[in-house]
Amino acid sequence: MIAAVEQLGQEIGIAAACRNLQTPRSSLYRARQPKPACQPRPTPSRALSPQERSQVRDMLNSQRFQDHAPRQVYAKLLDEGQYLCHWRTMYRILEAHQEVCQRRHQRRHVTYAKPELLATGPNRVWSWDISQLKGPAKWLYFYLYVIPWPVGQDRLDIYSRYVVGWLVAEQESSELAQALIAETCAKQGIQPGQLILHSDRGSPMKSKPVSQLLVDLGIIKSHSRPHISDDNPFSEAHFKTLKYRPDYPDRFADLPHARHWGHSVFTWYNHDHYHSALGLLTPASVHYGWTDLVLSQRQQVLQAAYAAHPDRFVKGMPVALAPPQEVWINQPQQMQSLFPKFSLELSHYA
């Protein structure tokens, strides 16, 4: 269009050409002026040197960390007493080389839905579920019973995401669920009136033996809403974490194979998995009260890094991430948030 205006303007004038072609003259004059060259952005004095950026990139792409997210690498190096840079800087370095992608080595499955659950105290609410594990034949399945973690917090504690009990069996039965719940409650020292047990509306969850056991133990039962698949999110997300691991087999050869896999994967999850919702701490660290010790060690590493290069920390002394003091899943409306304890008791009758 600008070229047409220029050509017509030579015959009838620029103003008339712009008016006939309905083109603003400012656009024509702007097009005539060459665009100034972009000035390169100056490098701040606190930025990493090229050698340091290369070191960070080599570390991220090393065989050890090539399938780890930068946050996981950051947390692992902190625990080993090494600080290279913040994980956001790691992302920028990867982005400069077009290497920001899904780094985790994971299986590609459908994303599980998110949950709804609210608790206000440690060991006050547990979420549990049952999942199928494929057996050696198409018609044969094993069943994984998992009571993933205590959910909740009070003024002193936070929820831990720790797997408190699990079981692999050849059948889905209420008797097995009853035995697992009783054993786990005894192991965790659950007192009558202390715990709410949340699950979906599967047959074992609603069975009479399990309901009677909960009454005998003084445990309040809670179920997801009918036809709402995302009311039990902790268990669903936990199963995704397990089944998206690279060592998750297409099929299990037999029951001992499934149980051996369970021992290894739950040990990894409880003691080696840096959970992003826990300030990059492991569930065991939070569950057993090691939080202060781990955070103290991490803070010493960060302080040493700050003392070496204070100009790289624009906001001052870095602080090690800490687990949240309050945990909400689908936080209720303002009226419900004014009475969290009351809303929690109402969930029993929902």
Image (cartoon, rainbow, N blue to C red):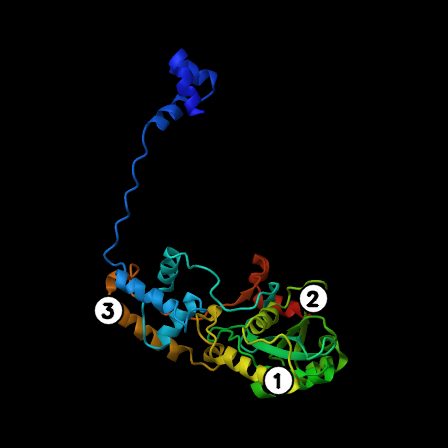
Q: CA distance from mark 3 to mark 1?
A: 51 Å
Quarter containing the N terminus: top left
Q: CA distance from mark 3 to mark 2?
A: 55 Å
Q: Label 2 is placed on what type of residue?
A: Ala
Q: Earlier in the sequence, mark 2 or mark 1?
A: 1
Q: Which residue is mark 2?
A: 350
Is 58 rendered above or below residue 27?
below
Answer yes or no: is residue 182 visible: no
User: Which element type, helix, strand or loop, lies under badge 2?
Assistant: loop
Q: Within 10 Å of the Cα at label 3, are there few (<14), some (14-19), or many (20+) other Cα atoms?
A: few
Give the residue displayed 50% in from the left and 79% down from the top.
Answer: 268
Q: Label 3 is placed on what type of residue?
A: Ala
Q: Label 1 is placed on what type of residue?
A: His
Answer yes or no: is residue 347 visible: yes
Instruction: Tell me: 257 left or right of 4.
Output: right
Instruction: Tell me: 131 left or right of 96.
Output: right
Q: Within 10 Å of the Cα at label 1, are there few (<14), some (14-19), or many (20+) other Cα atoms?
A: few
Instruction: Tell me: 40 left or right of 71.
Output: left
Give the residue displayed 64% in from the left and 65% down from the top.
Answer: 231
Q: Nearer the viewer, residue 315 or 88?
A: 88
Choose mark 3 or mark 1, whichever is in front. Answer: 1
Choose mark 3 or mark 2, whichever is in front. Answer: 3
Q: Residue 306 location, x and y as percent?
A: 27, 67
Q: Residue 157 location, x and y as percent?
A: 48, 75
Q: Which residue is mark 1?
A: 257
Quarter containing the C terminus: bottom right
User: Which element type, helix, strand or loop, lies under badge 3?
Assistant: helix
User: Which element type, helix, strand or loop, lies under badge 1?
Assistant: helix
Q: Residue 314 location, x and y as percent?
A: 29, 59
Q: Earlier in the sequence, mark 3 or mark 2?
A: 3
